[in-house]
Amino acid sequence: MKKYKSLFAILTAVVLLCTLIACRQAPKTETVTQAVTNANGEIVTDKNGDPVTEEVEAVVVTDANGQPVTEIVTGSDGKAVTKVENGEYKNVTQAVTERVNVGGDSANAKNSGGNQNSGKKSSNKTTAKATTKKGATTKKKATTTKKGAIVKPAAPSTPKKAWTDKVKKDSLVLHWSSVKCTGYEVQYSDNGQTFSSLKKSTKATEIEVEGLISNTTYTFRIRAYNENKGGRSVSKWAKTSAKTAANKDKRKITFHVTLPVKGNIEDKLIIEVDGDKYEKEVNLDGSTVTIKTDEKYWGAVKFKGRLVKTKSSFSGETDKEVYSFSLSGNAIDIIEGEDD
């Protein structure tokens, strides 16, 4: 009997020893995919705006049923990061992990990038965010920043207003309200549709614009931008318009008028300027005719050109010595230039 009691005691000790060894073994790890964050804890995105991810060795948190616990990935603004899947926007989720480095000493443990750590301090920064899930103990989500990853800057605010002053016949001063940004882009247009660059980059909030044409309406637009090695982000455009002052010199006006093609029939061209009338007999053959006023006029004057028989007409305003326009049905093209 004593022999059997001794054998039973030995077996019990062996079972307890095995249990103790099993309890001391490191928990099982898995390779999971997690979002990469920068040093500020912000989600790193690619050129398409999708979160950058990497595979890490970690212990996955499970609920009471043994199912992995997941959480919604959020950006620096606290809002959920989304992606397009099957034509619908869906929240980006990832597994909740307890830790990244598991088991063994620092010379043998795997770092968050999945590479063997040589015992030296890792250059990848690791941050942790506490989360709580129903049915699970509070754990920490491990996120990492890849070395050298640069995030495209956020777009700045749009300047609240833009305006002009000191408007002359060939120049003006353009102003706009200041916002926090890297710099500003400034463009202009003399037709309100096609814009050209006035300043590709400036940190000022006012510039003097020179070389303008008198008695002409210009549209200016300004937007702010932020820029770093990750790219450039811009605000919406702030716009304003201004008409330059008219030339006040007293001068005679020479009109160049392009006639329509109407079978070479005869017609009469009449140009009325500030109440004065000038006439000329013409043939409608597509040629260009010239009428010069006898009187001199000050500043910007209104005029009207018309054909008596075909009733084609054009009205305008000019402060120039030379003005060219076309009469072809009701379609009018206007061209301003210098006398030659």
Image: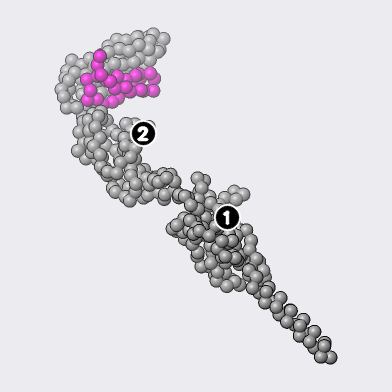
Residue 271 spot, x, y in % from top left: 26, 18
Q: Residues within 10 Å of mark 1 (few under 14, many from 20)?
A: few
Disc 2 from disc 1: Cα separation: 52 Å
Image location of residue 101, percent across then percent down: 56, 63
Residue that appears at 48% across and 56% down: 123
Image position of 306 (left or right of 276): right
Pointer 2 residue: 195
Asked if one can make out residue 324 in the rendered structure from this viewpoint, the answer is yes
**What is the quadrant of residue 279 in the picture?**
top left
Mark 2 vs mark 1: which is more N-terminal?
A: 1
Tell me: residue 333, above or below residue 78.
Answer: above
For label 2, the crowd category at 10 Å Cα-Cα, with few meaning under 14, some 14 to 19 and many 20 or more, is some
Looking at the rendered structure, the kind of residue marked 2 is Phe
Is 69 a magenta residue?
no
Query: Which range of residues does the magenta coloring cover?
Result: 311-340
Q: How far across and down, in percent of the image, does residue 74 sit?
A: 50, 59
Front residue of 72 and 236: 72
> Which residue corresponds to the image point at 64% horizontal and 68% vertical from the top-left?
27
- Magenta includes 313? yes
Q: Nearer the viewer, mark 2 or mark 1?
A: 1
Q: Secondary structure at mark 1?
A: loop
